[in-house]
Image (cartoon, helix red, strand yellow):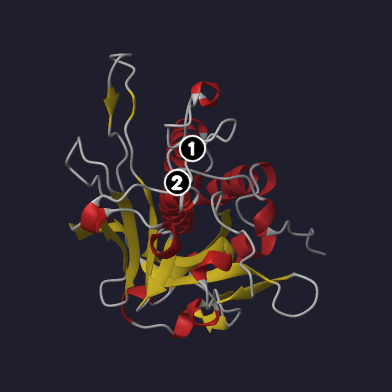
Amino acid sequence: MQPASLPQSHAPAANAWQVFLIFLRLGLTSFGGPVAHLAYFRTEFVARRRWLSESDYADLVALCQLLPGPASSQVGMALGLLVVATAMGSLMLSRGISGTVSDASNIQQQGAYALRVIGQHMRQAGSMRLNLSPGTATAGDPFIAPVAIEKSAPSRGANAFDPSTDTIKEDGGKLSIGYRRYAEPSFSNASSEVYAMRNCVGAPTDASKDERIENIFEFNATTNELRCSGNSAAAQPLINNVAQFQVRYIIQDNSAGPSKINITNAAGVGRWGRVQAVEVCMVLYGNETVDMPDGSSYTDCAGDTVNMTTLSGARARRMHLLFRNVFQLRSQGLVEPT
């Protein structure tokens, strides 16, 4: 009766250096000819290290006995090749896993960066000048103590900020966010103020101009980029490898009965002053081709299932990750009269 063989998955990992040391020791200490060498091989590779099962080793010996030359030499070479091939396979698998993990990390970083930039400006949408010392306000100031935010933005020409039209809007798939830019105290000089606010591409460049800060986010389906522009600055890529970009708006509706919250796209907003928060959803894909099973899928921003194995072009068999976040507009959301 043959002894029970141990499953190969239970065998400890092998490497080429271990194989070299084992054969070096056997070559220096083994005596007795090919038959004895076969017994030594079984002791080292099957019984002690369990790199092969009993049945696998028996099949290997039977095959080598059909070949010309000493059977022990054939078995020794076959064992070395098997172990080295296994080690190389493990190395390639490890590199593949490492590449997939690195790809996922890169996607996570891009998604987090885009949401951070969008959120930074989204939370300021509609904001006005803040009086840092409301207790010192007088009747002549544009502030009403103890309210610390000015009532309305001053007229500054074509680039002035109008909260009713410039706070947030979407036109032709472009999400536009605006707020007032004003002079702020400078840390370098307590007696001076500077215009430090910039949009997502570092505009406007004029460091002494009171005007509207404008951020325009646009998804380019041709280049798969999420771009940002504003204040007459040319659009620049914010992130790459974007498969989908969707924006929905959370509004407060008191048109009929008790006030209620609705989530809608741009076409259903109606009056932009009702927008209280914005939901941003993106799907990003990686650069590494993944050996994924047929039928592997993800759920997109609309809730639809997308089969990643049937995609073509740059997205074919790539990892896809969805990012979704809701940003509250701190200066918006007051219920408008019906």
Q: Count the labels in the image.
A: 2
Q: Residue at x 56, y 31 (%)?
A: 145
Looking at the image, can residue 290 be seen? no
Query: Is tag 2's residue or tag 1's residue first in the polypeptide sequence?
Result: 1
Q: Residues within 10 Å of mark 1 (few under 14, many from 20)?
A: few
Determine which residue is flagged by label 2. 120
Residue 153 in picture, x, y percent from top left: 38, 48
Q: Nearer the viewer, residue 34 or 240?
A: 240
Furthest-right residue in this view: 1
Image quarter for residue 311? bottom left
Q: Residue at x 53, y 44 (%)?
A: 14
State the mark number for residue 317: none
Rendered-image quadrant of the N terminus? bottom right
Determine which residue is flagged by label 1. 18
- Image side of residue 214 versus residue 97, left or right: left
Rendered-image quadrant of the C terminus? bottom right
- Image side of residue 122 versus residue 162, left or right: right
Q: Residues within 10 Å of mark 2 (few under 14, many from 20)?
A: some
Furthest-bottom residue in this view: 310
Residue 238 in picture, x, y percent from top left: 31, 56
- Name the amino acid type tagged 2: Gln
> Depth-wise, is mark 2 or mark 1 nearer the camera?
2
Q: Nearer the viewer, residue 316 or 98?
A: 316
Residue 321 in picture, x, y percent from top left: 51, 64
Mark 2 vs mark 1, CA separation in Å: 56 Å
> Does 202 appear above or below 196?
below
The local secondary structure at tag 2 comes to helix
Looking at the image, can residue 268 be seen? yes
Q: Residue at x 43, y 56 (%)?
A: 107
Residue 65 in picture, x, y percent from top left: 50, 66
- Name the amino acid type tagged 1: Gln
